[in-house]
Image: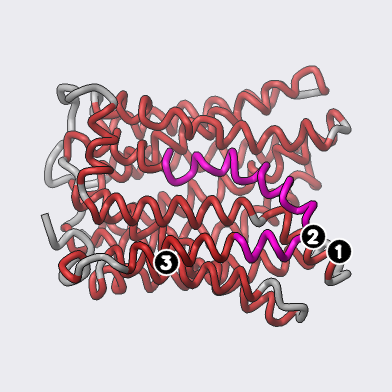
Amino acid sequence: MRRNTLLFVVISLLSGFGGSAMALVAGIWILDLTGSPSRAGLAGLCVYAPTLAGPWLGGLLDRLPRRPVLIGVNLALAAALLSLFAVRSAQQAWLIYAVAIAYGVSYVLMDAGESALLPAALPPDRLGEVNGWRSSAQEGMKLVAPLAGAGLYAWHGGAVVAAVSALMPLVAALLYALLRLTSAPGPVAVERGLRAGAAVLTRTRIVRVTVALAAVAIAMSAFTTAPLYAVVVDDMALPSTFLGVLLSAQGAGSIAAGLAAGRSVAARGEIAVAVAGAVLFAVGTLARCVPWWPAMVAGAVLAGIGLPLTLIAAVTAVQARTPGHLLGRVSATANTVMFGPITVANPLGSVAVHAGGRPALIAAAVISLACAAAAGRAPARDYAGAGGGTRP
């Protein structure tokens, strides 16, 4: 199983590098072509929008052989990226938006597909650990890839970034083909339509609670984007580049969380890890209200630890407690529940910032703490022995 573990981690490194590099360059490219910051910002929305179609895309995934789907999605993404060689002026900017949408669709299908494939490639007691390593790999690439992408763009424009990014899914497709599976998940009959995915999420308490906590933490992270900018620039009178310092600190915390998450889930259970993650995120958010820049950096590290803990706990709970033939749609539905609120929370944060940056940060922390407290009142049986797939 070490072979499969290594392959999954390398796939996460490749997808993290290509996606993070293009996420930055797409906006810069559109800005250079059109001169419009608002049009540049739409590229990010195009990436997140397909998340709302997660239940439908996941239902499609459960009808098809999962490994061939993952290979095909990666090959299609590579082809879409290569189409960016045709971009020459603002008239072709629509191609960049189309590729951003393709990335969003691929994220939904690959996240759900990998979640469905992992139990066929790894023993249940390794799921939490490997999910943590995959998270660390992706977060690590978020520290490296944007800088590399910006450098490549400055050197030779967007086409060279597209070419390098296209290479990543091509290699990932090969690595998926090399996986050794204990079972071969294939197309299955669809049960009760799309409602089957939602039914699993609501029926199993550990899945329901961890997915809800991850959704709250992720939504509050999006909600605090604009308020944090206001605190740094307006309240603290620091240069906007200090946000890069905070982002790097948060990324470092996320890497550490990913490395520790597997053992934590095995020892404490998914709900306990998700509660701890929500609390750490809230404490980190409050620390960023302190008018002292070292406290803000420390808060970014804590938030960076807390946020992925909630996500890893939720993903592991879904993988360990979902029937194999439903894993595609349940994973995609869970991703919609966890990431879909970003499309609402981010604009709300932009409105809330008019009342001041710190009140919005405090509100986000209070909401996270309240949800963690509600989940923390779970019966003891929900914690004991609940680690990474050890329970049916």
For the residues labelled 2 and 1, say whether their Cβ atoms are less than 8 Å apart.
yes
Disc 1 residue crowd, few under 14, some 14–19, many 20+, Cα 10 Å:
some
**x%, y% of residue 326?**
21, 35
Mark 3–mark 1 distance (CA, rounded to whole Å): 33 Å
Direction from residue 315 to residue 19 in the image, left or right? right
Residue under the image location 77 percent in, 78 percent down: 291
Boundaries of the magenta span: 336-363
Q: Which residue is mark 1?
A: 234
Name the chief secondary structure element in magenta: helix
**x%, y% of residue 261?**
36, 69
Q: Which residue is mark 2?
A: 230
Residue under the image location 39 percent in, 67 percent down: 373
Residue type highlighted by circle 2: Ala
Report which quarter residue 181 is drawn in. top left
Q: Nearer the viewer, mark 3 or mark 2?
A: 2
Does residue 364 sit above or below 164 in this rendering?
A: below
**x%, y% of residue 75?**
44, 29
Residue under the image location 30 percent in, 26 percent down: 59
The C terminus: image quadrant: bottom left
Tell me, for residue 84, which label it has, or none.
Answer: none
